[in-house]
Image (cartoon, grey):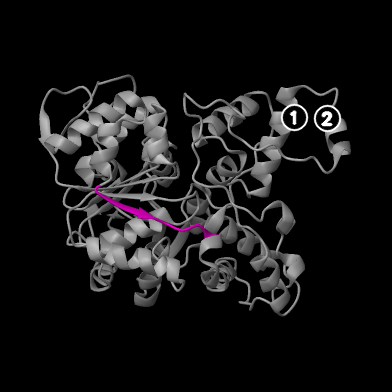
C-alpha cells in the first residue's frame, strides 16, 4: 500500500514493486488508507509520504489491531524528516527517487519471514511429502504439534503450493485476541454495532476471500464462537456483528493447535463436530528433538538471520557449541532455538559462536520434552495423572518457606518470561498454562506495578 503523491516518484516506486511481483494499491491519504484496510484491502507493507500524518496513522493501526510495517518515504535525504518519521512509528525511511534494489530488498524482507522451510530430517520429510500431496486440494487442514514447531510456517507453505497461492493468506491468532473482540475480528462488524465501532469493518473471512485463512491456536476459541464458526464452515457464509445479512465467503481453512485435541474434545473443551470438520487432513509436526539432523541447519539459519538483522558479521557455530545444543532437550522447539541463537550471535566474542554464548539450561533438566498438552481441561485437575518428581535440592524449597504462593507464582512467571526473551507463547508452554491465562496474570502484575519483560521477537 502506497500513501501520498510524492511528486510522481511514488508511481515509480509502485512500478518497481509491480515488476518485483508485488500487488500495489494507492491511497491519497491516511484516512483513505484506513478505510481501504477496514474494507478488506489487505497489505503486507505500507510506504507513506513523510508529509502525511504518520503518528496518527500508526496509532490508528494499533487501535484497529492491523499489523503492517510502515516505511516512510521522502524526497532526497531529509535527515530531520527521517528522524521524525521513525519517532512517530515508521520502521524505516526510504529516500526518493526510488532505488530498484532497495525496493526489492524491502519486499524480500517482508516475504522472507516465516516462509523458510528447512526439512532435511526423515521425520520432517514425511510431513512435507504429505503437505505437497494435499496442498492443491480444497481440504481443510488441521496442523498439530507442540508450541514452537513451525505450524504457521507449514501453513504458509501449503498456501503457496495451493491453487490459491496468488490469493491472500490471512492469519488470526485465536489465543492473542480477547474473547469479546475475536468475533468482530473474524466476521467483521457494522458501524455502531458496539461501543467504539465507528465504521464498518471487514472481517478476516472476507479479507481472505479467494485465499487461505489460518486460525492459529483454534482450540483457544470460546465455546459460543466455536458454534458460529462451525456454521460458517457448513454454510460458507458469515454475518457481520450488528447485521442480519449473510455474506458468502470463499476461503480455505487451515487451523493449528498445540493441544491433544482428541483429549480436549473428550474433556468438553472443544466441540466434537467442529473437530471432525477441521480434521479432514491432519499434519502432525514433529518436535525438534524428533528431527535431530535438522538442528545444525536451523541453528545456523537463525544465527545468520540475526547477524544480518543486527548488523554484525556472520559466524559459524563451533563444534563445542553444536555438541552443547545436541545434548539439550529443546522443550520450546524451534522458537526456543531461534531465541537462543539470536542471543548467541549478540553475545559471542570469538571467531565462531562459542559454547558459552549458547545460554541454555542444564541438559539433564530438559532432556525429555513434554507430549502435546491436555491443558486445563475441565475434567483434569492440577497434578492429576502426573508423576511425582524427586527434589534433588531441598534447600531450594526451604528458601521458599515464609513466602505466599501468589508471590512465588509471580516470580516463577516473570523469571520464565525473562528466560524466553519475553516470548509469551514459549513461556506459557514451559509453564504448562494457556496463553490466555498467562496474559491475564501479566495484566494483573502490570496493574500491581511489576515490570513485565518485553518480547525480543515482537510477540
> What residue is rendered at 26% in x and 27% in y?
227
Quadrant of the rendered image containing residue 100? bottom left
* Residue 5 within the magenta-colored segment of the rendering: no
> Quick one: SS at disc 2?
loop
Q: Are marks 1 and 2 in contact (CB under 8 Å)?
A: yes
Tell me if residue 457 can be seen.
Answer: yes
Viewer-closest of 53 and 231 = 231
Q: Is residue 361 left or right of residue 151?
A: right
Where is mark 2, residue-wise? Answer: 400
Where is mark 1, residue-wise? Answer: 408
Viewer-closest of 453 and 333 = 333
Percent of width and height locating residue 320: 73, 75
Q: Is residue 405 left or right of residue 215?
A: right
> What residue is rendered at 44% in x and 57% in y?
150
Quadrant containing the N terminus is bottom left
Image disc number at residue 196: none
Tell me if residue 118 can be seen.
Answer: no
Percent of width and height locating residue 115: 38, 64
> What residue is rendered at 70% in x and 30% in y?
409
Magenta span: 280-288
Q: Is residue 163 above or below residue 51?
A: below
Q: Is residue 6 above or below residue 422?
A: below
Amino acid at each position: 500500500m502506497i500513501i501520498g503523491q510524492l511528486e510522481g516518484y511514488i508511481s515509480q516506486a509502485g512500478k518497481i514493486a509491480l515488476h518485483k511481483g508485488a500487488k500495489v494499491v494507492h491511497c491519497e491519504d491516511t484516512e483513505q488508507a484506513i478505510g481501504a484496510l477496514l474494507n478488506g484491502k489487505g497489505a503486507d507493507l505500507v510506504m507513506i509520504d513523510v508529509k502525511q500524518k504518520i503518528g496518527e496513522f500508526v496509532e490508528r493501526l494499533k487501535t484497529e489491531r492491523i499489523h503492517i510495517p510502515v516505511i516512510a518515504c521522502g524526497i532526497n535525504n531529509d535527515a530531520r524528516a527521517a528522524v521524525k518519521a521513525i519517532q512517530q512509528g515508521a520502521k524505516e525511511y526510504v529516500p526518493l527517487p526510488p532505488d530498484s534494489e532497495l525496493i526489492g530488498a524491502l519486499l524480500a524482507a517482508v516475504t522472507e519471514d516465516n516462509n523458510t522451510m528447512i526439512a532435511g530430517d526423515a521425520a520432517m520429510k514425511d510431513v512435507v511429502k504429505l503437505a505437497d500431496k494435499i496442498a492443491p486440494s480444497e481440504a481443510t487442514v488441521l496442523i498439530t504439534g507442540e508450541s514452537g514447531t513451525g505450524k504457521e510456517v507449514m501453513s504458509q507453505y501449503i498456501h503457496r503450493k495451493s491453487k490459491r497461492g496468488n490469493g491472500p493468506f490471512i492469519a488470526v491468532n485465536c489465543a492473542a485476541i480477547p474473547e469479546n473482540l475475536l468475533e468482530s475480528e473474524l466476521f467483521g462488524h457494522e458501524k455502531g454495532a458496539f461501543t467504539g465501532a465507528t465504521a464498518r469493518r471487514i472481517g478476516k473471512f472476507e479479507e481472505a476471500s479467494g485465499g487461505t485463512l489460518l486460525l492459529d491456536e483454534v482450540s483457544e476459541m470460546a465455546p459460543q464462537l466455536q458454534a458460529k464458526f462451525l456454521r460458517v464452515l457448513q454454510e460458507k457464509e458469515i454475518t457481520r456483528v450488528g447485521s442480519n445479512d449473510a455474506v458468502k465467503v470463499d476461503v480455505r481453512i487451515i487451523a493449528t493447535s498445540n493441544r491433544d485435541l482428541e483429549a480436549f474434545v473428550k474433556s468438553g473443551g472443544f466441540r466434537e463436530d467442529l473437530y471432525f470438520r477441521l480434521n479432514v487432513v491432519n499434519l502432525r509436526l514433529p518436535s525438534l528433538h524428533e528431527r535431530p539432523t535438522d538442528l545444525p541447519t536451523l541453528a545456523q539459519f537463525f544465527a545468520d538471520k540475526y547477524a544480518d538483522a543486527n548488523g554484525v558479521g556472520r559466524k559459524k557455530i563451533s563444534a563445542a557449541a553444536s555438541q552443547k545444543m545436541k545434548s539439550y532437550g529443546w522443550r520450546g522447539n524451534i522458537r526456543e532455538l531461534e531465541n537462543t541463537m539470536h542471543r548467541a550471535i549478540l553475545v559471542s566474542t570469538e571467531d565462531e559462536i562459542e559454547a558459552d554464548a549458547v545460554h541454555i539450561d542444564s541438559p539433564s533438566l530438559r532432556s525429555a520434552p513434554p507430549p502435546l498438552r491436555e491443558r486445563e481441561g475441565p475434567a483434569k485437575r492440577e497434578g492429576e495423572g502426573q508423576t511425582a518428581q524427586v527434589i534433588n535440592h531441598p534447600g531450594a524449597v526451604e528458601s521458599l518457606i515464609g513466602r505466599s504462593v501468589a508471590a512465588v507464582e509471580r516470580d516463577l512467571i516473570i523469571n520464565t518470561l525473562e528466560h524466553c526473551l519475553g516470548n509469551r507463547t514459549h513461556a506459557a508452554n514451559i509453564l504448562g498454562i494457556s496463553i490466555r491465562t498467562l496474559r491475564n496474570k501479566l495484566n494483573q502484575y502490570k496493574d500491581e506495578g511489576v515490570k513485565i519483560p518485553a518480547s525480543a521477537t515482537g510477540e
